[in-house]
Image (tube, grey):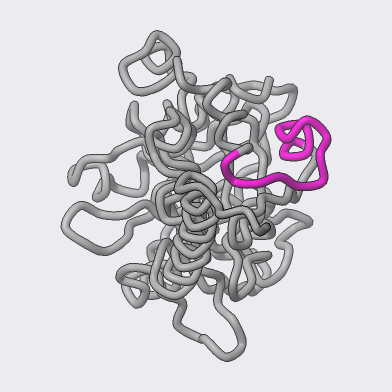
Amino acid sequence: MRETPTSGERTAPRLSRLTAVLAVGATALLCATGPGHAAQAEDPLPNIPDYQAALDAVKSPAVRNAVCRFLSVPLPRGGSSSPRPIPDKADPCEGLPTFTIKDPLAVNEITPGFAAGTAQPIPTEAVKLSRLVSSLSVTVNDRQATVMLNPTEGGGWHLAAVRDGDSDAAFAGQAELGSVVFAEPQIRGWYQLKVTTVTPLNDQARQGLGGQASMSLSDYQKLVKERYADKQAGSEYDTKGFSSGYDAPSTEAEQHVPPSTWLVVGGSSAVLVLASGAFLLLHRRRRDTTD
């Protein structure tokens, strides 16, 4: 005699299938219209909000001059974090080799709700677009640099900083159609998310997954909830300047500070910043989470 499944036994597989369908659908939506994937050969205009404005920004003379100012000053030695003012020259790029700034790439980060465990473990709620980065076409005097753009209130993008090295752009550029690359900035971990599987891309991320080669997004959420649920905005962790990375807000006035107020700040990595507390705090947070 064949047994008849109970109502609960019939419901469980349906719920499981529904969860899978929602996850796949969310991933498809994220890759097609979400926080922005890296430019593909067949997709020259990635779906980054106000992408043309971002492209115009990184190709602008002002951003190029900021990169030249950064590259024209020797890196601070000995881990010094003392700000170094940059003299304003008529032609900041004079004497430097020719270079171009590559097209901007999206940098996604885990969302506060995902880290707190209040958001669903699906791609569209787990990660969000944080900023854009662009590296240089060639090394200049044996150095690479990354242009960092922050979103401007009301639309568009503006220069936030120029940072030594190109690791952020290198990781962001690993995004493929059907996957999303995102960062866990507190540990400087980089991951790839495909459907609902999280795969580490660097040593910090592998350590963040406890040495596992991959795990489900829901299991990854359990890990970050343990790490950050008590470190949300307004917590002691946040008020002491340790929390989540790069979203140091700027005011409209700070976006138009004259070039003579650019500074190079050293430490664990050198950053060209505006002479404002917001951008100096951006670098201090990065240093405190890695030293």
- Pick out the residue farthest to the front: 1
Measuring from the top left, give residue 100's x and y in whole percent.
Answer: 58, 74
**Total label count?**
0
Measuring 59% from the left and 81% from the top, which residue is drawn there?
40
Which image quarter is the N terminus in? bottom right
Which image quarter is the C terminus in? top right
Q: Nearer the viewer, residue 48 or 9?
A: 9
Measuring 45% from the left and 61% from the top, which residue is drawn there?
22
Is residue 208 shown in magenta? yes
Measuring 51% from the left and 22% from the top, which residue is drawn there?
228
Measuring from the top left, give residue 137's x and y in whole percent.
Answer: 66, 72
Q: Does the image show residue 109?
A: no
Measuring from the top left, give residue 211's x and y in whole percent.
Answer: 83, 34
Q: Check the image and report above or below for 159 versus 234.
A: below
Measuring from the top left, give residue 189's x and y in whole percent.
Answer: 67, 40
Write down the quadrant of residue 183 in the picture: top right
- Pick out the residue farthest to the bottom: 42
Q: Nearer the viewer, residue 112 or 3?
A: 3
Q: State left or right for residue 134 relative to residue 142.
A: left
Q: Check the image and report above or below for 45 versus 22.
A: below
- Range of magenta residues: 204-218
Q: Check the image and report above or below for 67 versus 179.
A: above
Write down the quadrant of residue 47 in the picture: bottom left
Q: Does the image show residue 3?
A: yes
Q: Check the image and report above or below for 176 versus 226.
A: below
Q: Nearer the viewer, residue 132 or 224?
A: 224
Is residue 11 shown in magenta? no
